[in-house]
Amino acid sequence: MKIVIIGYGWVGQANALALTLMGEKVYYYDIQAYKPHYSSRYSAVYGRVTSLSSPLGQDSENTCYLVCVGDRTLPSGQQDISAIKSALTSLSETKGTVILRSTVLPESLKSLKFDFYIPEFLHEKKAVEECIEPHFFVIGERIKDSKQPPFFKKWSRSAHKVFRGTPEEASYIKYLSNIWNATQIAFVNEFGDSIKKPATREDVDASKKIIDFVLGGGSYVRYGKSFGGHCLPKDISAFIYKQKQKGFEASIISGIKESNGLHEQLQKTHNVLPEWYSEWQLPEISLVTSLKIIARILYRKIFYLFK
Ligand SMILES: NC(=O)c1ccc[n+]([C@@H]2O[C@H](COP(=O)([O-])OP(=O)(O)OC[C@H]3O[C@@H](n4cnc5c(N)ncnc54)[C@H](O)[C@@H]3O)[C@@H](O)[C@H]2O)c1
């Protein structure tokens, strides 16, 4: 099996490096020169991923394409998937399997040609590791019970949770996950601001003490800076826009966006709020399960060491 990554940005590189480390032969194609995002930890692995000068340069029945091209959200909130459409069109003559990894609204998937929709849930700071052991492995099959590429088995085994359904269901899971993460951040920040305006570190600590007592201070529920980055703001705006178009007022989700905007204004004048890095929180597990996981990690570490 050959894997070709189409779009070598954050998601494309994380998938390429992870799959290379998992023992796959990986190629990439991008319409522009790439900037390495994970070279501090994985510079040696970059050399094992081969560049292609055309997307179908390694095409065969055993080639699997992972399309990791970015979407955009226009100022109106409308999602622009023209780059994704153009990447999929460049693969229209393939004999292989096409897997879409970009974030696409459920309603837009019908117009796209692919075999599997597998949305990506990684965080940029631990992207390669999260790509080897995904938190969610969500498989949206275009045709029910299609034959899956062999490396799906590895992801299914290492994932914390696996879902199999339609591409539309997979997309709703992606948006639900992003919007839920954003909701928690916005809610905690709004509550913190209501206790005390964060003018000094002591003010921040005073609000934090109350919030952490109830919510535990874990990922996404820590009082701090507003949510931003490449994904949450654009995905929420696109979701709200689409719902409005369908005649549905997503009032709570719209409120999250508004609340985050107000908090963003506040942090411009009160620059003491901490920036949090959030990651997937695993539920508490039994001793036996913990030992099984440790044994699996050790086995994998030894396996990669001798590869
Ligand atoms: N960045 C993240 O943390 C993250 C996490 C989960 C999901 N996502 C989603 O994954 C998708 C990709 O995000 P990203 O952050 O990797 O984007 P990115 O901008 O870093 O990378 C996209 C790459 O695609 C390339 N490209 C554009 N058109 C192309 C074409 N026709 N053929 C080949 N390459 C082409 C671009 O040159 C760019 O290098 C988005 O839909 C995003 O929402 C991103």
Image: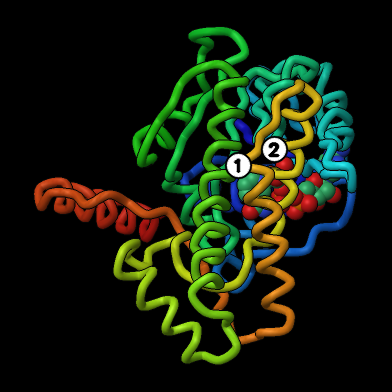
In the rendering, which numbered label is found on residue 252?
Answer: 1
In the rendering, which numbered label is found on residue 102?
Answer: 2
Of the 4 image quadrants, the one containing the N terminus is top right
Label 2 CB less than 8 angstroms from ligand 1: yes
Return the residue nearer the eye: 206 or 71: 206
Q: Position of residue 285 (x, y in %)?
A: 19, 49
Helix or strand or loop: what does disc 2 sit on? loop
Helix or strand or loop: what does disc 1 sit on? helix
Q: Which of the 4 quarters of the picture holds residue 81?
A: top right
Amino acid on which the number 1 mark rests in the picture: Ile
Of the 4 image quadrants, the one containing the C terminus is bottom left
Residue at image coords 86%, 36%: 80
Above or below, 92 against 198 in this view is above
For the residues labelled 2 and 1, the Cα–Cα distance comes to 25 Å
Judged left or right of residue 44, residue 205 is left
Above or below, 28 against 67 in this view is below
Residue at image coords 89%, 48%: 75
